[in-house]
Image (spheres, rainbow, N blue to C red):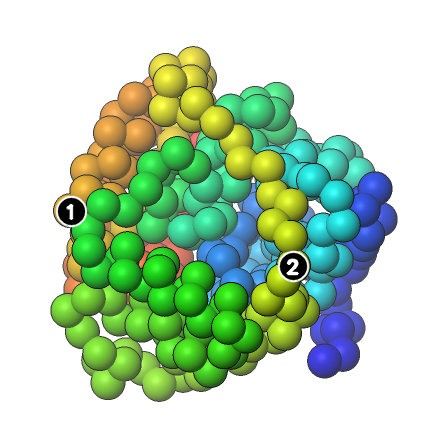
Amino acid sequence: MTAPADLRFFPSADGDLAYLDTGSGDPVVLLHCGFVDHRFWAAQIPALAAGYRVIVPDVRGHGWSANATQPFRWADDLAGLLRHLGTGPAVLVGVSMGGVIATDTLLDHPDLVRAAVVGGSATGDWQYTDDWHRGIQAEYARTMAAGDIEGWLDAFLRVAPGEHRTADDLDPDITRRLREMALHTISKHTPDEKDRLVPSTDNWSRVPAIRVPVHTVNGSLEPADLLAAAERLSAATPGGRSVTIHGTGHYPNLEKPEEYNRILLDLLRTL
Protein backbone atom coordinates (compact mmCIF):
# COMPACT_ATOMS: atom_id res chain seq x y z
CA MET A 1 0.00 0.00 0.00
CA THR A 2 1.40 3.39 -1.02
CA ALA A 3 2.08 5.80 1.81
CA PRO A 4 -0.25 8.82 2.02
CA ALA A 5 1.29 11.93 0.49
CA ASP A 6 1.11 13.90 3.75
CA LEU A 7 3.16 11.41 5.77
CA ARG A 8 6.68 12.38 6.78
CA PHE A 9 9.46 10.08 7.95
CA PHE A 10 11.87 10.29 10.89
CA PRO A 11 15.14 8.39 10.25
CA SER A 12 15.51 6.58 13.58
CA ALA A 13 18.48 4.38 14.41
CA ASP A 14 16.41 1.36 13.35
CA GLY A 15 14.53 2.41 10.22
CA ASP A 16 12.17 5.20 9.21
CA LEU A 17 9.19 6.03 11.43
CA ALA A 18 6.17 7.65 9.79
CA TYR A 19 4.22 10.57 11.20
CA LEU A 20 1.83 13.39 10.33
CA ASP A 21 2.63 16.96 11.36
CA THR A 22 -0.11 19.52 10.77
CA GLY A 23 -1.54 22.70 12.24
CA SER A 24 0.31 25.22 14.41
CA GLY A 25 0.44 26.19 18.07
CA ASP A 26 1.15 24.18 21.19
CA PRO A 27 2.04 20.58 20.28
CA VAL A 28 -0.44 17.73 20.78
CA VAL A 29 0.64 14.17 19.97
CA LEU A 30 -2.00 11.55 19.10
CA LEU A 31 -1.00 7.94 19.80
CA HIS A 32 -3.08 5.19 18.21
CA CYS A 33 -4.14 1.83 19.63
CA GLY A 34 -2.46 -1.46 18.73
CA PHE A 35 -2.47 -2.87 15.18
CA VAL A 36 -3.74 0.29 13.44
CA ASP A 37 -2.05 3.57 12.39
CA HIS A 38 -2.40 7.35 12.32
CA ARG A 39 -5.74 7.08 10.46
CA PHE A 40 -7.30 5.99 13.76
CA TRP A 41 -7.43 9.72 14.58
CA ALA A 42 -9.03 10.91 11.34
CA ALA A 43 -11.95 12.60 13.13
CA GLN A 44 -9.69 14.30 15.69
CA ILE A 45 -6.88 15.67 13.51
CA PRO A 46 -8.79 18.50 11.79
CA ALA A 47 -10.62 19.48 14.97
CA LEU A 48 -7.32 19.84 16.84
CA ALA A 49 -5.25 21.29 14.00
CA ALA A 50 -7.47 24.39 13.99
CA GLY A 51 -5.71 25.53 17.16
CA TYR A 52 -2.75 23.22 17.83
CA ARG A 53 0.24 21.62 16.16
CA VAL A 54 -0.87 18.00 15.80
CA ILE A 55 1.75 15.25 15.51
CA VAL A 56 0.45 11.75 14.77
CA PRO A 57 3.02 8.93 14.58
CA ASP A 58 2.65 5.44 13.22
CA VAL A 59 4.10 3.39 16.08
CA ARG A 60 7.05 1.18 15.12
CA GLY A 61 5.80 -1.95 13.37
CA HIS A 62 2.47 -0.29 12.53
CA GLY A 63 1.17 1.50 9.44
CA TRP A 64 4.05 2.84 7.39
CA SER A 65 6.69 2.75 10.13
CA ALA A 66 9.59 0.30 10.03
CA ASN A 67 9.47 -2.98 11.90
CA ALA A 68 11.97 -3.46 14.71
CA THR A 69 15.22 -5.28 13.96
CA GLN A 70 16.66 -4.65 17.45
CA PRO A 71 15.25 -4.13 20.95
CA PHE A 72 13.28 -0.91 21.35
CA ARG A 73 11.00 0.96 23.73
CA TRP A 74 7.91 2.86 22.66
CA ALA A 75 8.79 5.84 24.85
CA ASP A 76 12.28 6.11 23.37
CA ASP A 77 10.90 6.10 19.82
CA LEU A 78 8.49 8.90 20.66
CA ALA A 79 11.15 10.88 22.52
CA GLY A 80 13.44 10.56 19.52
CA LEU A 81 10.74 11.90 17.21
CA LEU A 82 9.88 14.86 19.45
CA ARG A 83 13.54 15.79 19.84
CA HIS A 84 14.05 15.45 16.08
CA LEU A 85 11.16 17.88 15.57
CA GLY A 86 12.49 20.22 18.23
CA THR A 87 9.15 20.32 19.96
CA GLY A 88 8.02 19.86 23.50
CA PRO A 89 6.84 19.66 26.10
CA ALA A 90 3.78 18.23 24.34
CA VAL A 91 0.38 17.00 25.41
CA LEU A 92 0.19 13.26 24.71
CA VAL A 93 -3.20 11.77 23.84
CA GLY A 94 -3.44 8.00 23.57
CA VAL A 95 -6.00 5.20 23.42
CA SER A 96 -5.25 1.60 24.49
CA MET A 97 -1.64 0.92 23.44
CA GLY A 98 -1.33 4.64 22.74
CA GLY A 99 -2.34 5.41 26.31
CA VAL A 100 0.41 3.12 27.58
CA ILE A 101 2.92 4.87 25.32
CA ALA A 102 1.78 8.21 26.74
CA THR A 103 2.29 7.14 30.35
CA ASP A 104 5.57 5.35 29.54
CA THR A 105 6.90 8.54 27.97
CA LEU A 106 5.67 10.67 30.85
CA LEU A 107 7.52 8.44 33.31
CA ASP A 108 10.71 7.91 31.28
CA HIS A 109 11.02 11.28 29.49
CA PRO A 110 9.09 13.73 31.71
CA ASP A 111 10.78 16.77 30.18
CA LEU A 112 8.93 16.13 26.93
CA VAL A 113 5.41 15.90 28.39
CA ARG A 114 3.18 18.79 29.43
CA ALA A 115 0.15 16.60 30.21
CA ALA A 116 -1.45 13.36 29.08
CA VAL A 117 -4.96 12.28 28.12
CA VAL A 118 -5.33 8.50 28.04
CA GLY A 119 -8.14 6.02 27.46
CA GLY A 120 -8.58 2.26 27.28
CA SER A 121 -5.50 1.82 29.48
CA ALA A 122 -3.78 2.89 32.66
CA THR A 123 -0.06 2.22 32.91
CA GLY A 124 1.86 -0.45 31.05
CA ASP A 125 1.92 -2.86 33.99
CA TRP A 126 -1.87 -2.92 34.32
CA GLN A 127 -3.48 -6.07 32.90
CA TYR A 128 -7.05 -7.16 32.18
CA THR A 129 -8.36 -9.66 34.71
CA ASP A 130 -11.79 -10.51 33.26
CA ASP A 131 -12.30 -13.76 31.38
CA TRP A 132 -13.62 -12.12 28.20
CA HIS A 133 -10.53 -9.99 27.55
CA ARG A 134 -8.19 -12.80 28.55
CA GLY A 135 -9.99 -14.99 26.03
CA ILE A 136 -9.48 -12.41 23.28
CA GLN A 137 -5.76 -12.20 24.13
CA ALA A 138 -5.48 -16.01 23.98
CA GLU A 139 -7.20 -15.98 20.59
CA TYR A 140 -4.72 -13.37 19.35
CA ALA A 141 -1.83 -15.62 20.35
CA ARG A 142 -3.37 -18.78 18.86
CA THR A 143 -4.34 -17.29 15.49
CA MET A 144 -1.11 -15.31 15.10
CA ALA A 145 1.02 -18.38 15.82
CA ALA A 146 -0.97 -20.30 13.21
CA GLY A 147 -0.70 -17.54 10.61
CA ASP A 148 -4.52 -17.37 10.58
CA ILE A 149 -4.98 -13.73 9.54
CA GLU A 150 -8.77 -13.91 9.15
CA GLY A 151 -9.15 -15.55 12.56
CA TRP A 152 -6.89 -12.94 14.09
CA LEU A 153 -8.88 -10.11 12.47
CA ASP A 154 -12.14 -11.60 13.79
CA ALA A 155 -10.74 -11.53 17.33
CA PHE A 156 -9.35 -8.01 16.91
CA LEU A 157 -12.66 -6.64 15.65
CA ARG A 158 -14.58 -8.08 18.62
CA VAL A 159 -12.80 -5.58 20.88
CA ALA A 160 -14.61 -2.58 19.36
CA PRO A 161 -18.15 -3.54 20.49
CA GLY A 162 -16.85 -5.37 23.56
CA GLU A 163 -18.29 -8.22 25.55
CA HIS A 164 -21.93 -7.14 25.70
CA ARG A 165 -22.50 -5.86 22.15
CA THR A 166 -21.98 -7.10 18.60
CA ALA A 167 -20.67 -5.47 15.44
CA ASP A 168 -24.30 -4.70 14.55
CA ASP A 169 -24.33 -2.18 17.40
CA LEU A 170 -21.59 -0.13 15.72
CA ASP A 171 -21.50 2.08 12.66
CA PRO A 172 -20.22 -0.37 10.01
CA ASP A 173 -17.70 2.23 8.89
CA ILE A 174 -15.88 1.82 12.23
CA THR A 175 -15.48 -1.91 11.64
CA ARG A 176 -14.41 -1.34 8.03
CA ARG A 177 -11.76 1.21 9.00
CA LEU A 178 -10.37 -0.88 11.86
CA ARG A 179 -10.18 -3.94 9.62
CA GLU A 180 -8.40 -2.05 6.84
CA MET A 181 -5.80 -0.59 9.19
CA ALA A 182 -5.24 -3.83 11.10
CA LEU A 183 -4.85 -5.87 7.91
CA HIS A 184 -2.24 -3.42 6.67
CA THR A 185 -0.27 -3.65 9.93
CA ILE A 186 -0.54 -7.40 10.51
CA SER A 187 0.58 -8.04 6.92
CA LYS A 188 3.93 -6.44 7.80
CA HIS A 189 4.69 -9.27 10.23
CA THR A 190 5.26 -13.03 10.22
CA PRO A 191 4.17 -15.65 12.77
CA ASP A 192 7.77 -16.48 13.75
CA GLU A 193 8.84 -12.84 14.13
CA LYS A 194 10.64 -12.05 17.38
CA ASP A 195 8.93 -9.54 19.69
CA ARG A 196 11.65 -6.93 20.24
CA LEU A 197 9.61 -4.56 22.41
CA VAL A 198 11.23 -3.89 25.79
CA PRO A 199 8.35 -3.00 28.12
CA SER A 200 8.60 -0.22 30.65
CA THR A 201 8.46 -1.59 34.21
CA ASP A 202 7.48 -0.57 37.75
CA ASN A 203 5.12 2.05 36.38
CA TRP A 204 2.51 2.13 39.13
CA SER A 205 5.20 2.63 41.74
CA ARG A 206 6.47 5.68 39.83
CA VAL A 207 3.10 7.37 39.31
CA PRO A 208 3.36 9.47 42.53
CA ALA A 209 6.37 11.24 40.99
CA ILE A 210 4.27 12.61 38.11
CA ARG A 211 4.06 16.41 38.31
CA VAL A 212 1.66 17.12 35.43
CA PRO A 213 -2.03 16.22 34.97
CA VAL A 214 -3.03 12.86 33.53
CA HIS A 215 -6.65 12.98 32.40
CA THR A 216 -8.50 9.78 31.50
CA VAL A 217 -11.33 9.55 28.95
CA ASN A 218 -13.00 6.14 28.71
CA GLY A 219 -16.11 4.53 27.34
CA SER A 220 -18.65 3.54 29.98
CA LEU A 221 -18.76 -0.02 28.60
CA GLU A 222 -15.14 -0.74 29.49
CA PRO A 223 -14.58 -3.35 32.24
CA ALA A 224 -15.00 -2.10 35.79
CA ASP A 225 -11.38 -2.83 36.69
CA LEU A 226 -10.08 -0.70 33.83
CA LEU A 227 -12.33 2.21 34.81
CA ALA A 228 -11.15 1.87 38.40
CA ALA A 229 -7.51 1.88 37.30
CA ALA A 230 -8.14 4.99 35.21
CA GLU A 231 -9.71 6.76 38.19
CA ARG A 232 -6.76 5.77 40.34
CA LEU A 233 -4.27 7.07 37.75
CA SER A 234 -5.93 10.45 37.21
CA ALA A 235 -6.49 10.96 40.95
CA ALA A 236 -2.79 10.40 41.63
CA THR A 237 -1.68 13.31 39.42
CA PRO A 238 -2.01 17.05 40.03
CA GLY A 239 -5.25 18.30 38.54
CA GLY A 240 -6.00 15.00 36.81
CA ARG A 241 -9.61 14.39 35.81
CA SER A 242 -11.48 11.24 34.80
CA VAL A 243 -14.26 11.49 32.20
CA THR A 244 -16.60 8.75 30.93
CA ILE A 245 -18.40 8.79 27.58
CA HIS A 246 -21.69 6.97 27.99
CA GLY A 247 -22.57 4.07 25.73
CA THR A 248 -19.15 3.62 24.16
CA GLY A 249 -16.54 0.90 24.43
CA HIS A 250 -12.80 0.73 23.87
CA TYR A 251 -12.69 3.38 21.13
CA PRO A 252 -14.86 6.34 22.19
CA ASN A 253 -13.09 8.62 19.70
CA LEU A 254 -14.47 6.43 16.89
CA GLU A 255 -17.96 5.86 18.30
CA LYS A 256 -18.74 9.42 19.41
CA PRO A 257 -16.11 11.62 17.76
CA GLU A 258 -17.89 14.94 18.30
CA GLU A 259 -18.32 14.32 22.03
CA TYR A 260 -14.77 13.02 22.34
CA ASN A 261 -13.40 16.07 20.50
CA ARG A 262 -15.36 18.44 22.72
CA ILE A 263 -14.06 16.76 25.88
CA LEU A 264 -10.50 16.72 24.58
CA LEU A 265 -10.55 20.37 23.56
CA ASP A 266 -12.05 21.32 26.93
CA LEU A 267 -9.25 19.47 28.72
CA LEU A 268 -6.60 21.10 26.54
CA ARG A 269 -7.94 24.54 27.38
CA THR A 270 -7.33 23.90 31.08
CA LEU A 271 -3.59 23.40 30.59
N-terminal label among 1 and 2: 2
Question: Residue shown at 73%/73% (left/top)?
Answer: 4
- Give the quarter of the figure containing the N terminus: bottom right
Q: Which residue is mark 2?
A: 193
Residue for badge 1 = 224
Point 47% across, 34% down: residue: 103
Amino acid identity at mark 2:
Glu
What mark, if any, has residue 78 been given in the picture? none
Q: Callout 1, which amino acid?
A: Ala
Q: Pinpoint residue 214: horizontal percent, then vertical percent.
A: 38, 32
68 above or below 153?
A: above
Residue 244 point in image, percent of width and height: 22, 50
**Residue positioned most to the top:** 209
**From what the image shows, is residue 261 above or below residue 254?**
above
- Eyeballing the image, is 109 above or below 20? above
x, y (%) of residue 94?
A: 46, 48
Residue 267 visible, this orientation: no
Question: Can you tell which of label 1 and label 2 is closer to the viewer?
Answer: 2
Q: Is residue 95 at least partly visible in the picture?
A: yes
Q: How many marks?
A: 2
Q: Quadrant of residue 213?
A: top left
Please state, as top left, top right, bottom left or bottom right, where the C terminus lies in the image.
top left
Q: Which residue is depicted at the point 25% across and 36% down?
A: 229
In the depicted view, which residue is nearer to us: 254 or 35?
Answer: 35
